[in-house]
Every structure is written in structure tokens, then in C-alpha cells.
Amino acid sequence: MAANAKAEPLTNGKLKLMICDDSNIIRRKIERELKIDRLQVIATAANGKLAVEAFRKEPADVVTMDITMPEMDGIECVENLVKIKPDVLILIISALSDKATAIEALKKGANGFLCKPFTDRQLTEALEELLRGAGNDD
Amino acid sequence: MGILDLGRYKGIVWAITGFLVAFIAILALNHGIAGLFADDVAGVKFLSQMRTQPAEIQANARTITERLQAGEKVDDAIEALRSSATAYDHAFIGLAGGMVSDNSGATIGVSALNDAEAKAMLADGEKVWKEYKAKLDPILRFSGSPYAAEAPAPAAPAPTGKNAAAAPAAEKPAGVQLSPRGRRLQTALVELNTFAAASQAQLSQISTKLAGQVEESSKGNAALLRGVQIGGLLAALALLGALFFYFARNLRKEEMVSSRARKETADILRTVNEGLFLLDKDLKLGSERSMALNTIFRKEDFMNLTFDSLLKDIVPEKTLKTAMDYVALLWGERVNEKLVKTINPLNEVEVHFDNPAGGFDTHYLEFDFNRVKSDGSLSHLLVTVNDVTKRVMLSRELQESQEKAQAQLDLLLRILHVEPDSLTGFLTDADVSLKMVNSILKEPAREETAFRAKIDGIYRQVHAVKGEAAALGLKTVEQRAHAFEESLSDLKGRPTLSGSDFLPLVVKLDDLFNHLAQVREMLGRLVDLHHAIAARRTSGGGQVEAAKVDQWLAGKHDQTMQMKALPTQQPQQEAEAAVGLERTLEDLAARVASSHSKQVSLKCTGLTEVPESYKRAVKDITIQLVRNAVVHGIETPDQRVKAQKSETGFLGVEFTQRGEEGFELVVQDDGRGLQLDRIKEVAVERGLITPAQAALLDPRQTMALIFRPGFSTADRVTTDAGRGAGMDLVRILVAELGGRVGLASAGGRFSKFKIWLPSPSRAVAA
Amino acid sequence: MMTKVELETFVEGTTNYFATAANQPASVGSPYIVQEGRPTVQEFTGLISIAGKRRGIVYFTASRPMLTVMLMRMGETELTQENMCDLVGEVANTISGNARRDFGKDFMISVPTVVAGEPEKIVTPDNTRSFVIPINWRSHSAQLVVCLE
């Protein structure tokens, strides 16, 4: 997996966001409720495989990622995305059925976790926290 | 940190600045005084040179005199005299202004020349020199040749060695002819020589004295310089000492502050309720931790413990693995600490501690992890542990009670078919019973006996409620009353009793009150629904809109509709109350029979004749007896067939007036009758009698055992029977009314309970 | 619905105070329910309000003679009105502390207020039964009243 993707910033200076979730409702909800000016949705993907393809063409700066998806699940997808662009920020958005799975995704390189179902405010806060910096706690 | 914001280093910066300023000041002073000292030295040198100048002038004048005598050329000698006189004159002018010239020609101020004594001396010298200059003047103005025209030009320079001897000015060599101007020069020279000889001592003395004075001042300056140097050294030492003291004091202060901080930390760690510890990179527990950990983890020794070994024995393996993964993630730089808190696997984790008395103690612990950074990099994880068992239990209780509430509603909806008037009657009675329970509770009690005395009374009330609820098929009420009874039995078995033990009772009582209120509300809606349906019927074929019915069902009472419906309802109510008990008993018998796989047919007579004041008691008694008969008396169909009886058992309830005196209530069945041996066995098991006593009992005495408190022949405790309160209750109710109980039974054939009750007026009199 | 754990927590908070501060344990009397009307209020009452999952009040009410003896047992010589108010306030504080410890996340618990006399100032939520738990101490009897929706 060569890091052959071209990472051109958007002309308006915003960060690029990709939404990856097999539920159309969730994808639309995230798109609709995105209240952060610094982010612009450049792609949505219904499974991990599509997400990786889209990411190769145009890597996003920030990704929201479901875990249970057909074709390629969120954990494998995270692993691939991080290989392509090591500084990508990934927020896992998943129902909290199994903490061990969520932790697995974090081990592969995701930065944070948001539990489904989430409110508009929780989403905004989580994304803002994500942008504040991975690994930063102050 | 801003320039002026020096923080804790302010003291040091000020001290060092002070030291440097003092040092520079001393150096400057030293330098200044050293300069003065050099000036004085130059002054002394200048003055000693000046002292020799008059002699030089005199020597030059003498040279001119000698040249004249020898007839030699005098021009250059006059020039020499002029130069030495000018130098001396300049020296005087300078001295008058307190200035001297050093070797290089620069002028230097000498302060010592400025005092009054020196000035006076200088003034004297100047006066002499003025006269001296007057004598010099004619000589210095001389130019040309002093000799007569015939005088030969000097053939050779005068031997220089000759002028060392000071010859008298008048002496002249033979053959030299002076011109008149030459003679005048000679005269002036003679005068000058005379004056010079006379004044030289004076001038020289003045110079000497001045030099002495300057030297004196120079000595003073030297002393001052030494003083300044010593003073400076001392000041520097003092400052150094002060600095040292200052730092020592600050160090001590800091030491005190940090030791206080350490003590505070220790205090906090000792007293804080939370378990606190630090984890290092190797996941080892730090040495500083709160005492609460000991209580939470039930151990004293945490030295060199790893996080892994702390949890190993108390959480399942899978949880442990997930937890270790999670902690490892926190050490990584990639995850955002705040965004992973929700998946902390140790947030409310169930742990099990070995109980020394056997088994496990289950607790719930809450772990919280926070990154600790020092110098910008992650150094530790701060772990906070809380025992949240109570909280978890409480939230479970809350959740359970919510679920229960949901279940209640479902059940209530299912029992909507219960006859509304029976239900109303039950609710009224139950309310009275529960209020009675509450007033029993309210009786003040301090001693154990007082607490124990309450139990039986409460038991009877609750048992009656349970019986009626069972009869109506109100499962939810019955279950609650049953649970209440269980608590009471539990209390009865306890060796000691106090008010705290009664707390569960009030909670259950409250629950029953609540529940009955819900039933009442449901009943209200049910009645409305009945009326709605009735109204629909009377209005002839579904004229009432379906929406109205929906409204009633939703609990929105329509006043006008209710008013319209009520009058038709009213007259029937009396008759229905009696029919109510009959139906209650029928329902009860059928329900109990089906749950015991039995068949029974109930025949009631005369129940409408029960006087108002006995209704309650008769209801309670018949419910108990009917239930008992079905559970204990009637056999299963195949047993009955074997005994050559019909499959369906017969059960009769009969209420009749017995003359003026009173009433008779008979409840009989065609079942197996009372089994005397079984009754004896149970009585012995229950500790009511000893085996020896059992052997001596006759049939009548044996039958009486079933009325003893605590007797029950049912093997399992169920809501239908068991517990033994049933017959005891019958006995008490009858006794309260002043009646009697009779019992007849034939093994395999029947049992017959005959209860005599006095007429109400007599009962009151009795 | 009131739960056993809740009730026990409040009772424990109260008895704790007697065991530790008044140097003599109190015993719990027979608890009962007040359905309608006001539960007992004596001369001095320390009260906390509760919000969150449950709403209502919890109070400890005691007579002057009882508080007098308590103060004396605690070594206090000034048997003033202020000190008695202080004392019931302290009991309420202990109850609140216990409740905070056990149900901190579910309940919001106010700081204690003290009422001397004036029972009309103590308002229980409408249509809510109150639990009254007598607290017997020496020959005296105080009440812990728990009234939560």
C-alpha cells in the first residue's frame, strides 16, 4: 500500500471529511447535523471497501467510521486508511455493544469513539475534540 | 513568562543585580580615587621640577654675563634665558589656576593647590616672580650685538666648561669693548644676578612647600583608596553573606512549602474516599496512593504490584484483557483521551472478592484514567477507583421498578374483565386493611416484644388482602401481598427485631398502596368504558362515535356521558353486591381448581341474606374455606374416580338465618375429608406439638390443630394455600364476631365447617 | 416508588450521626406511612431537598428537650436556639452526605436548611406519601421524614 494518494487541500482552506457508515440514515444525519465550519464533506461511503477506494482518490483529513459494515468492516478500513495517510483523524461512531471491538479499532489507529445513538451536540463536541488534536489532553 | 514576571526567581535576580551594582560602584570609586592619586604624583613631580627652574634661569643669566666678558655672542644665551623664564612663568600661571602640566604636556588639576594656604604661598611667589620678571625684561628685550663696532666677531665658541664657575658679573676680560647698549645689558645682568641670588631661596622654598602639601594630599588619597578598597571588600563580603542568607532562607521556605505540600498530599491520600494511584509505563502502581484503596481492594500490600495483578483475581479474563488493551491505548499518543472514555471497559465493572465466610462478594467498581504529563510528555496514568455498588444497585432497583410498573399495566389491562363492583368492593376492603397495617406500624415501639407483637396483626390483614385478590384473579395484587407475607415470615424467624428490620415493610406497604391506586384508576376507566358501551346500546346501534370510546379508554372522562349513564346503574347495585361475592367465590374455586388440575362445582345459597355488618367477615371466611376445600379437600379427578366418586367435586356454601339468635354459615365438600395422621405429622414438624403429645390426641383435638397459628398442610408455600394463616384467620374472625366454629369430617367422604354467628345486635351487646 | 436502599441510606445517615457525634447510638422505631396531611414536625427541623431522578424532601425533626440532651452529651454548654438549629442542620448534612455518596449520580441534593418551629414552612410534594421513621434516642423520639415523588 503505497502512499500514492495526492493530498491537495481544499481551496477554501477547510478540512476534508469522509463519512463511512452502512446506514443511509446515519450518513445523512451526520451530513445534516455537521455544525463545524472547518469541515466539509467530500465523500460518503457505505462500506469499508468503498471508503478505501474513495480515500485513495482523495484522502480526507477527518473520517467518521462505523464498525459493523458489509464487504469490509470498520476495523480493517481504519487499518487501510492509516496506511494511506498516517495523520488522518478517525472517529469511530458505533453502537456500544462490545467495548473490545471498539478498542480493537483504536488499536488499529482510530483516534476516538462516539457511541450510537448520538445527539447533534454530542457529534459536534466529539468532532471538535477530535480536531483539537489526537493524543492531546490539555 | 514576561520580563517583569520573574516569578519565584525574583529574589535571586534582585540579589544578583544588587551585588553587581555595588561592585560597579566600588570599582568606579576606586578608579576615581586612583586617578586623584596619579594627579597628585604628577603634581609633586611638577613642583619639584619647578623648584629647579629659578636656578636654571640664574645659570642662563650667568652664561650671558660670561659671554659678555669674553666678548662672545650672546643671542642664543638670551634665547635660553627667555625659554626658561617663559616655562617658569607658565608654571606660575598654571599653578594659580590649580593646574599643572605632566610630562606629555597635558594639564592636570591638583586639588591640593586650591586650598587657602597654597594660594597664599603662590601669591607670595608670584609677587617675587613679578619683580624677577621686571629685572629679566630689559635683558630679554635685548637684540643685536652688545659690542663696539671694532670688536672682533667671536672666533670660536666659548668653552662650555667655563660657565660652571660663577664669576662676579663685573669681571671682564681685557680687550672687550662694549657698546653703550652692551653696557646697559651688562648693568641689567648685574641687577638680575643680584635679585636672583636674593630670591632664589624664597622661590625654591615656595615650590618645596607646595610640593610638600601636594604630597600630603596624595598620602591622604592613598589612605582613602585603601579605605575604599577595604570598604568595598567588606561590602562585597556583606552582600555575599546576605545573598547566602537569602538563599538559605528561601531554600528553607521552599523546603517547608514542599514538605507541607507533601504532608497535604499524604493527608489527602489518607482521607480521600476515592482510590487513587499512579501507573507508570510498566503498568506498575506508584508508591503514593490513597488509603481508600485498601478498603476497595481489601488488601494492604500494593508494593510492586502491577495493574494486571491487581485485577487478575477479581475480574473475568476477558474483561482483564480488554482493560489492559484500553490502558495500553492511553499510553499511545494517537487516541484522544476524552473521546475514548465511553469505551472504558472498567467503567462500572463487576468484581468479585472472596468472602472469608465462603462464596463471593460482588461489588461494582468504577475506574477512571487520566493522563499525567510532565515536561510535555506522558509520564503516568492517574487512576481513580470508586466503589459504586450502591449506585448500581439503586439504578437497577429503579429500572426494575420501572419494568414492574410496565408489567402492572399490562396485567391490569388483562384483568379488565373482572366485574367492576367486585373490584370496587375489594379496593375498599383492601384499603381498610392496609390502613390497619399502617396503624399497627404507627404504634410506637422501642422494645423487641413490641415489634414482634405487630407481626401477627399485620400478617392477618395482609393475608386477607391476598386472599381476596386471589379470589378476584388480581394476580399483581396477590403477588405483592404474597411478597409482603414473605417479609413478615422472614421477620418472624429473626432472633432480634428492630425498626430497621421494618423498613422493607413500609416500602412494600407503600408499593401496595400505589398499586391499588393504579387499579382504582384503571377501574375508573373500566367503568367509563362500561357506561360508554351501555350508552351506545341504549342509543340504538352504535350511534356513539368510536372516538368517544377511545377517549374513555385513554382516561379522558366525559362528565355528561357519565351523568346520563349513572341513573340506570344505581338500582341494580344492591343485588349485584351479593351476586358479587357469589361470583367471587365461583371464580376463586374455578381458578384454584384449574391450577391444581381439579374439577369443582360450587353452589352458593343465602349469600344475599348476609347482614351488612357481616359482609366483610363472611367474605373473608368463605374465601379461606373455599380455597382450603379446593386445595386440601377435593381430590384430583382420577383419585375421585378410583374412590368411586364423580370427577367433579362438589362444594357448597350456605348462609342461613337461625331464628332470632343468629346465623349459620356452612361450607362443605365431598372430598377426602381431614387426614388426621397427616395433620399430626405437620403439627409435629411445625413444632406445635411433640410426637408424644400427638400420640395422645383424639380425632377432635387433632382437627382443632388446623386452627392453630402457623399450621399449614400444603407442602409448598403458594399463593393459594400454605403458610397456615388461613384457618387461623377464620378462627380469629369468628371469635371477633363472638361466634363459634364447628368441624365435622369423615375420612374419604367429606369435610364440613359449620360457623355460628350471633345476630349483629347481639354481637354488639356482647 | 420508594426503594428499600433509598430508605436505608437516609436512616443510616441519621443513625450514623448519633453513633458518632452524640456518643450514643439511636434506635430506629417502627416506620409508618402518612398518606394525607402533614407528617410530624417538631420544634427544630433540618431539611434537604432532592431533585433529579426523584424529587421531594427529607427532613429530621426533633424536640427542644432532645436536642438539649444531645448538646449536653456533646459537651456543649451553650444550650441556645442557634446551637439547636445547628445541630438539626448537622444531622441533615450527614443524611445529605450519605445520600450523595450512595446516589450521587442520580440525585441532586440541596444544602440543608433549618426551620425552627413554623411547620407550615415545610412543604411536602402533593399527592405523595411520606415515610416517617421514628428515631429513638434515650427517652426521646425524633422523626426522619422521607417524602419523595
Image (spheres, rainbow, N blue to C red):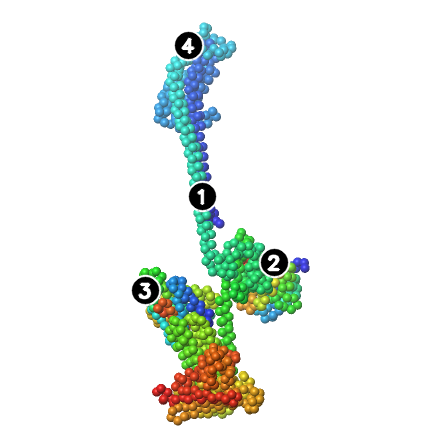
Q: Secondary structure at mark 1?
A: helix
Inspect the image, locate mark 3, and give the three-letter code of the amino acid beneath it.
Gln
Mark 1–mark 2 Cα distance, whole angstroms, equals 51 Å
Q: Which residue is mark 3?
A: C81
Mark 2–mark 3 Cα distance, whole angstroms, equals 69 Å
Q: Secondary structure at mark 4?
A: loop
Q: Is residue B469 visible?
A: no
Q: Nearer the viewer, mark 4 or mark 3?
A: 3
Inspect the image, locate mark 2, and give the three-letter code of the amino acid beneath it.
Asp
Left or right? Give the position of A111 relative to B226.
Answer: right
**Chain of residue at mark 2:** A
Q: Residue furthest right?
A: A1
| Residue B645 against residue B284 in the figure, above or below | below
Q: Which residue is mark 2?
A: A87
Inspect the image, locate mark 1, and give the three-letter code of the amino acid beneath it.
Ala
Q: Position of residue B261 (x, y in %)?
A: 46, 52
Inspect the image, locate mark 4, and give the three-letter code of the amino acid beneath it.
Pro
Q: Position of residue A127 (x, y in %)?
A: 55, 63
Q: Are marks 1 and 2 on the same chain?
A: no
Of the pair C57 and B144, the residue shown nearer to us = C57
Q: Which residue is mark 1?
A: B248
Of the pair B411 and B475, the residue shown nearer to us = B475
Of the pair B476 and B92, the residue shown nearer to us = B476
Classed neighbour count for the residue bearing mark 2: other residues with Cα under 10 Å, few (<14), some (14–19), many (≥20): some
Classed neighbour count for the residue bearing mark 1: other residues with Cα under 10 Å, few (<14), some (14–19), many (≥20): few
Q: Which residue is mark 4?
A: B168
Between disc 4 and disc 1, whose residue precedes? 4
Q: Nearer the viewer, mark 4 or mark 1?
A: 1
Q: Secondary structure at mark 2?
A: loop
Mark 1–mark 3 Cα distance, whole angstroms, equals 54 Å
Mark 2–mark 4 Cα distance, whole angstroms, equals 117 Å
